[in-house]
Image (spheres, grey):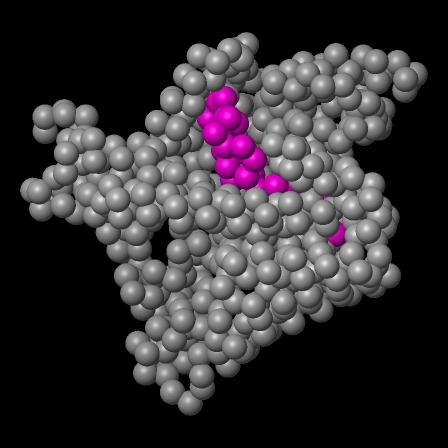
Amino acid sequence: MHLLEQFSSLDKNEKVISAIQGWRGRAALFVLCVLLFSVESADLFKAVLLLGLAFSFAYIPRHQDLVLLVFTQALGVYRIVNSSNYFNNDVGKVMAQEHAVGLAAWEISLFTYVVYILLAWLALVYVRRNPQSFAARQPVWVLLGLALALLIASSGGLLHGMARVLVWSFLVTYCAYIWFLAYALLDQGAKARSPDIVQLGMLHPFWGSTTLPYGKGAALLRKARANSAQALAVTQIKGFKLLVWAICLYGLDALLSYFFETVLQVRSVESEISTYLAHEPSTRPRLILSLIWSQLDFALWFGLWGHMVIATARLAGIRLPRSTWRPLEARTMMDYFNRILYYFKELMVDLFFTPSFLRYFKKHPRLRMFFATFMAAGVGNMIYHFLRDIDLAAEMGLVELFSSFSSYAFYSVVLACAIGISQLRISAGFRPSDTVPGRIKAFVLIWGFVSLLQIFGDETRSHTLAERLQFMFYLFGIPQ
Amino acid sequence: MSADLHQRLRPYVQELLAQNMDFQEFSDADSLFLSGRIDSFSLMQLVMHLEENYRIDFSTVHFEAPLLDTVADIAGFVLEHSRSVAM
């Protein structure tokens, strides 16, 4: 216990803070972090590369903007050239369909990537120079409109051959970067907006991200940089602590995977739906276990992944808030959303909730709050996941791409309504109880609800909404 | 006048923090939003409070959360944008 307390207060220990500011402390921290990082990634080279960039960034304070741009873009190009980027796989699929030969997938990916970065920069300049234009006032909807146009052009039978391959390649790059660009465009109207090299350096920053911008955009970066040697040391120690915690979660997930999947033989929700549809349903307790494990695994992986990214950013001296923060203590649905997927929630709030809240239903406070919440947790959530899996269009075609999304759309609507109602209750003065029974009740209700939603939130698209509803009715013993 | 405004804003901020079960002390310079002590929902409640009590029209402002990160930031924002606060 004493050791745990010492570890948790490491970032307040003056001796450690002082040691981290010397070269020996820095070297020791780097080695420790590389070892920890490679436990999860099982790739020592990747650990050295990423953390090498992070530590270099932290110790080059004078030209950090330029370093951010160079590191981010160099890593982006490196991943494409080394075929470790999913763009290449997606482009390869369409190249095979179009019998496109003569160029490697990575060459096309690299070309469209460079074009994308150039166009992104031109978009920033345009929006800045034309603040009253529609693109400047509604950048998110313009970006989404363009994504739809590219999708129709590349997958609607309009283009063939290399033209289709090129547009498709641009689409997958565009969708991977769309939310990063949205943040950059929104920042153009800010008084203290960051220079373009920072905006372009924040397009999938080197510390890691998925299609979700961990660390948001330049606006947060302006406030989050450690601005003294002391602050940098404290931030790095916090990064180290988070990395340790991530590895603990990694171990816990492995242990629980063994327990649920090997000992208890719990199957995935998808498998359970398949066996139910084949008229060989598992017992209800097994189905409940499947839902619980699915939700737990989801929470552990998001926690682990987010911690790895945020720890890397902190080791680079960027004081980013954690992506996941004690999700089991969530007291309301919004609180759950906030605790488990902080940057996703922030993206939805920044791009969908806030603009809706500031524009619509100002004279109707409850409707205003519900509508804005629905736009974020429902509409934004749907759009985010649809674009994230845009690569499926290559195999499915447009019609199936949209129709197979109905289950996730349903999931988003139900989730949005639940969060909206939860918000309205708080607006009406409801406060979750702080007693132990109150906390247990909140835990059971929230985690029970989100576990149940796993029936619809699964993203494999292998079952229809109707099939999933039948499965849910069976689970509750409702005759059909 | 600014100090008076700080004192008028603090109880409301305290109420927002209490909604998140946060009963810790805070100074006028403490980060509320970027530190995670106030979530986006509470921030929008703050926006409504400022709209109603200080007649601020947020549709005319390039709004970003860091503008209201501390009590001092909120007071500065109110002084800059309010149509009703006594200067």
- Residue situated furthest front in the rendering: A2
Would residue A84 be seen by someone viewing this image from the given angle?
Answer: yes
Taking the spot 82% from the left edge, 51% from the top edge, the residue there is A19
Figure quadrant of residue B63: top right
Taking the spot 49% from the left edge, 45% from the top edge, the residue there is A249
Span shown in magenta: A317-342
| Nearer to the camera, A286 or B54 | A286
- Give the image location of residue A134, x and y in percent: 61, 48
Across the whole image, how many numbered discs are drawn on residues? 0
| Nearer to the camera, A51 or B35 | A51
Up the image or down, A4 lies above or below A427; here it is: below
Taking the spot 74% from the left edge, 23% from the top edge, the residue there is B56
- Give the image location of residue A330, x and y in percent: 50, 26
Would residue A457 be seen by someone viewing this image from the given angle?
Answer: no
- Residue situated furthest bottom in the rendering: A102
- Give the image location of residue A311, x and y in percent: 63, 50
Report the side of A311 relative to A79 (left or right). right
- Give the image location of residue A413, x and y in percent: 37, 33
Up the image or down, A255 lies above or below A40; here it is: above
| Nearer to the camera, A288 or A124 | A288
The stretch drawn in magenta includes residue B21: no
Taking the spot 78% from the left edge, 16% from the top edge, the residue there is B9
Q: Quadrant of the C terminus of chain A?
A: top left
Figure quadrant of residue B6: top right
Report the side of A24 relative to A286 (left or right). right
Q: Quadrant of the N terminus of chain A?
A: top right
